[in-house]
Amino acid sequence: MLYDWPLNREFLKFRKSFYLMANHAEPIDVVVTGAAGQIAYSLLYQIAAGTIFGPQQPINLRLLDIPPMLKVLDGVVMELEDLALPLLREVLPTAEPAKAFNNVAAAFLVGAMPRKEGMERKDLLAANVEIFKVQGEALDKYARKDVKVLVVGNPANTNAIICSHYAPSIPKENFTAMTRLDQNRAQATLAAKLNVQVDKIKNVIIWGNHSSTQYPDAAHATVTLSSGVKPVPSEINDDEWLNNIFVSTIQKRGAAVIAARKMSSAMSAAKAAGDHMRDWWFGTKPGEWVSMGVVSDGSYGISKDVVFSFPVIIKDKHYEIVQNLPISDFAKSKLDITSKELEEERAEANNVLKK
Ligand code: NAI
């Protein structure tokens, strides 16, 4: 395995023609930031094993972390080697964004400044604005123009909008934030309530921010039973549970995991990141949608220029927001709360950037 290699355009052109001549799929370059952290530890295996970009797609991995973590990253590289996975071609551990983002086709932005005791929300936002500004600039300069960016590091939605702002040469559609873990949690909770296998539940939606203001919405979800495909709300037949217990369970699930594990969700977050990117790469199944934080185009009355989680369908690597779903007054009030929070976060981030 090579740890370093020339990164200039000539070399990339040569590499492409080499793979074309040999009739092999050309490797794609994929970056994971926060690569020495706990989510990356589960995510890297999925990428290298082919469960995200497919079993025919060789991968060159770029692992970005901060200088004090480079020693830990060496251990991660050793483990990646020891996986002995044939799709994994090259691994580059680095603390330099210019190297990490060069020519990348997909970017998992997992690394972020964690909230420390006594830290105000706006201090957390300020620290992250700086990180995502630098990474946006590096994407703009070095990444492929069709790079697909998934922001996992919190506050994920606002980090994604900042990152996009500093990468003006890359379409805004290419910047997304992860709410798939919330969707997976919601799907699993409904399946348990109806006592069915998790894959029998479809089209539950996460609206808004990946925070405790998100709105997990089962109003359009379906369940496949032996008697046919039925709406989840009528099968549960308990609006009190759906509007209160279900919503707050999903909103607080992250905190419940932290309380039990003393660390935040990692295995499930990595799985969700894989689900998000795989669906973006290969498309959603017919009749199904998934939730992704995307730059708002004003759909459902949400203000533009925030990254808001909507239901989307994906085809040929492009997503579209599902339109015209009926929104009840209750749902509207929930959407208002989470969109207001995102507007506030955006304003705070803009204040930091102006300083
Ligand atoms: P962790 O603390 O184990 O790892 C974070 C890594 O990021 C560390 O190795 C750190 O050195 C690195 N890092 C910090 N600044 C960096 C920079 N400027 N460039 C590159 N790397 C940098 O954290 P963990 O558990 O892996 O979580 C990562 C992030 O994901 C956190 O912000 C967490 O809140 C968020 N998260 C998001 C979820 C979602 O659903 N959107 C779910 C769970 C976690």
Image: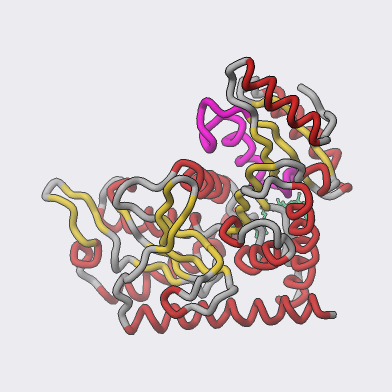
Q: From this viewpoint, which residue is outermost toward the top? A: 22
Residue 148 rendering spot, x and y as whole percentages: 60, 49
Identify which residue, 224 or 299, lies in the foreground. Answer: 299
Residue 200 rendering spot, x and y as whole percentages: 28, 48
Residue 104 rendering spot, x and y as whole percentages: 69, 42
- Please tell me whether residue 328 is drawn above or below residue 283 in the rendered image: below
Q: Which residues are magenta?
A: 33-58
- Please tell me whether residue 51 is drawn above or below residue 65 in the rendered image: above
Image quadrant in which you'd find residue 322: bottom left
Question: Is 130 displayed left or right of 38 in the figure?
Answer: right
Identify which residue, 179 or 98, lies in the foreground. Answer: 98
- Please tell me whether residue 314 is drawn above or below residue 347 in the rendered image: above
Identify which residue, 333 or 311, lies in the foreground. Answer: 311
Could one spot residue 259 in this view of the protein?
no
The colour scheme applied to this rendered structure is secondary structure
Question: Is 20 displayed left or right of 64 in the figure?
Answer: left
Position of the C terminus, as image quadrant, is bottom right
Q: From this viewpoint, which residue is outermost toward the right? A: 67
Residue displayed at 53% across by 38% down: 52
Looking at the image, in which quadrant does ligand 1 appear?
A: bottom right
Was residue 282 drawn as part of the magenta stretch in this picture? no
Residue displayed at 53% across by 46% down: 277
Was residue 37 drawn as part of the magenta stretch in this picture? yes
Residue 331 rendering spot, x and y as whole percentages: 36, 78
- Please tell me whether residue 113 is drawn above or below residue 275 in the rendered image: below
Residue displayed at 61% across by 41% down: 43
Residue displayed at 20% across by 69% down: 237
